Amino acid sequence: MKTEKAIFAAGCFWGIEAAFRQVKGVASTQVGYTGGSFSKPAYEDVCSNKTGHAEAVMVEFDPKKVSYEKLLEIFWKIHDPTQMNRQGPDVGSQYRSVIFYHNASQKKLAEESMKKEQEKHARGIATKIMKASKFWPAEEYHQDYYGKHGKVCGIKL
């Protein structure tokens, strides 16, 4: 099986991961931090709002079973992309909405999907589309948090 990777930030990473884990064709997920300049961040560092990182989920998927376009559809459905640096009660730049692309095809598809999504909202989309950078896995206790505890934060499952 040849897989591809996608990275999404849409608020608290527990809920994002829980949503993508349910998708047929997703081989694995991992929560972590990306988009900033701070090396080897810990959760406390990211929560300080000084690292530039967002809470994100890396999705490894089989493109023969689920398309990148379908992952983008799910991304748009599970959060409010019009909120700047927040989702629900979670506030701070670490909760911003970002699609991190790995190649030109992902960038193009992300831009097209954002244009379609904007048509559904009266307010502007706050989501950014950025080239993927170093992804720092979060601490083990954050991985599959929903599976371990049955709790998620603010994501529509």
Image (cartoon, rainbow, N blue to C red):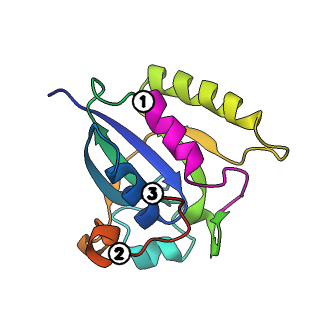
Q: Give the quarter of the image for residue 7.
A: top left
In primary-sequence order, the first of circles 3 and 2 is 3
Q: Is residue 10 rendered magenta in the image?
A: no
Q: Count residues near mark 1 (Cα–Cα under 10 Å), then give few for <14, some for 14-19, many for 20+.
A: some
Label for residue 16? 3
**Of residues 42 and 58, the one drawn nearer to the viewer in this rendering:** 58
Label for residue 132? none
- Magenta-tinted stretch: 68-85
> What x and y, as percent, mark residue 120?
75, 38
Give the Cα separation between the discs numbered 3 and 2. 14 Å
Tell whether 16 sits left or right of 112.
left
Q: Are marks 1 and 2 in contact (CB under 8 Å)?
A: no
Amino acid at circle 3: Ile
Label for residue 68? 1
Quadrant into which the N terminus falls: top left
Give the Cα separation between the discs numbered 3 and 1. 16 Å
- In the picture of the structure, the residue carrying the numbered disc 2 is 150
**Of residues 139 and 118, the one drawn nearer to the viewer in this rendering:** 118
The residue at the point 65 percent across, 65 percent down is 86
Q: Secondary structure at mark 1?
A: helix
- Residue farthest to the left, as pictured: 1
Picture layout, residue 75 above or below residue 148? above
> What x and y, as percent, mark residue 68?
42, 30
Q: Count residues near mark 2 (Cα–Cα under 10 Å), then give few for <14, some for 14-19, many for 20+.
A: few
Amino acid at circle 1: Tyr
Q: Secondary structure at mark 3?
A: helix
Q: Secondary structure at mark 2?
A: loop
> What x and y, as percent, mark residue 32?
36, 60
In primary-sequence order, the first of circles 1 and 2 is 1
- Residue farthest to the right, as pictured: 122
**Of residues 115 and 51, the one drawn nearer to the viewer in this rendering:** 115
In primary-sequence order, the first of circles 3 and 1 is 3
